[in-house]
Image: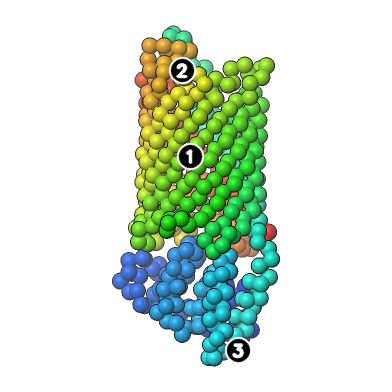
Amino acid sequence: MFIRPHKLKFFPVIIFLITSTFVFASEKNITYMQILQNPNDLDLNLKYAQQQGKMGNFKQTISTLERLNMLYPDNTEIKLYLLSILVQVDSPEKANTIIAEMKLRKDLSPEDLETLQEIESELKDREPGLWAFTLDMSAGSIFSNNVNSVSKSRLKSESDGVEVFNSAMHDRTLSGGLGLSATRPIGEESSFLINLSQTTSEQYQETDDDYQSYGLTLALDTIFVGQSVSPYLMLNKSDYQTDADSFSLMFGAGSFFTIGDRNTISYGYAYSDSKGNLNMSDTTANETNSIGHSYTLAHDFILNQLISTNISLGYSDSDAVVDAGNDYETYDIGFGLNFAFPWAYIATSNSLSFNDYKKEDSSVNSRILRSDVTNTFDIMLTKAIGDIFPAIDPNRSFFINMSYEKVISEANLMNYDYSSDSFSLSFSRTLSFN
């Protein structure tokens, strides 16, 4: 069933095991329903694990291989395949346990023993370096047909009167970003993250989106009462060219748990504190300083290997220094449909946001309390450059991203009654220093 060359080194073993060691009768994708119907079919389950590994879904790969390891405890190749995945996801404790068990066996072939020793040596080489470092780079451009949300009538309310909405509509924005992340495991089920980021944005015709932004994120991923929990703290500073510098602090936690292998429930809470830098040229910047609270609830469902869905609910509340026009509550509902095609990943979503303001804004209209609903549709395509040019991106860490967004806002004030379209094109790459 398995074809293995002599004296195969460790990393080629990983590639070989994942891509070419299993011989199957069919090359079609295996669905999760087929796995449920044939839980003991070794060939079928191994191909399913292989497909999940190619998609980067290592959790599902490990789950499948661990189950096969229990069903076929004497199958050396399953254990070696599982070891290769555990090394990739940096799970040394589980890997060392399997290695210790395999060393006690008397029936290991010389080739299997050599492979096992190389994996063990690789783990030992990794152990002193508890921290893993990655660099994320991105660059892109956004093209918008209504960058300033100009109303459909090109009119706006101002101080209880009606004025012409003269702001420019068409514009494009260039952006680039760098992010340096450091992660380290804490025990077997937890990890700690430190991320530093810098973003640059440049708008062509106007300068509203000309800024430099700097961020720091601290996060912990852990397991608590059988659920994955991720508390975090985020600090951000944005230096605008023609506006007050802004500062924000956010902390909160997200959590999720699975129901079977096809359903995931996630929920979270976030607290935010946003401030504008009051100075000689921005004497009213502090009026929009606000405290925010937000709550989210979502359900993800894997229909099959190709299609998955997402339903989300959200509520947020913002309280500003000056209530008029700044204090509001938002209710969100969204639906997403995702396609994991072999040639690209495509994600679509459609969401509704209902915004209810708490006090009339006299600078717009003192007689009408603002209320609006926004419908946002977007579609995004992501493709690894390595799928097209393997020589340029052999590790599939360089991506091209294209997206289209349509926003329709309906409001009881003409200022916020608008529609806009935007298209974005960006490139992103992740480099690992381990």
Instruction: Calculate the distance from the C-alpha at mark 1 to the C-alpha at mark 2.
Output: 24 Å
Disc 3/disc 2 C-alpha distance (Å): 77 Å
Q: Residue at x 66, y 34 (%)?
A: 212
Q: Position of residue 297 (x, y in %)?
A: 39, 44
Q: Is residue 333 above or below residue 321?
A: below
In the depicted structure, whether residue 300 falls above or below residue 45: above
Residue 268 in view of the camera: yes
Quarter of the rendering containing residue 416: top left
Q: Which residue is mark 1?
A: 270
Q: Earlier in the sequence, mark 3 or mark 1?
A: 3
Camera-near label (3 vs 2) is 2
| SS type, badge 1 | strand
Residue sitting at x 63%, y 34%: 237
Residue 235, percent across and down?
Answer: 60, 38
Question: Counting residues from the N terminus, which is met first, the one under dot 1 or under dot 2?
Answer: 1
Q: Tags 1 and 2 in contact by the CB under 8 Å rule?
A: no
Q: Position of residue 322 (x, y in %)?
A: 50, 19
- Kind of residue at badge 2: Ala
Q: Which residue is mark 3?
A: 110
Front residue of this view, candidates 336 and 121: 121
Q: Secondary structure at mark 3?
A: helix
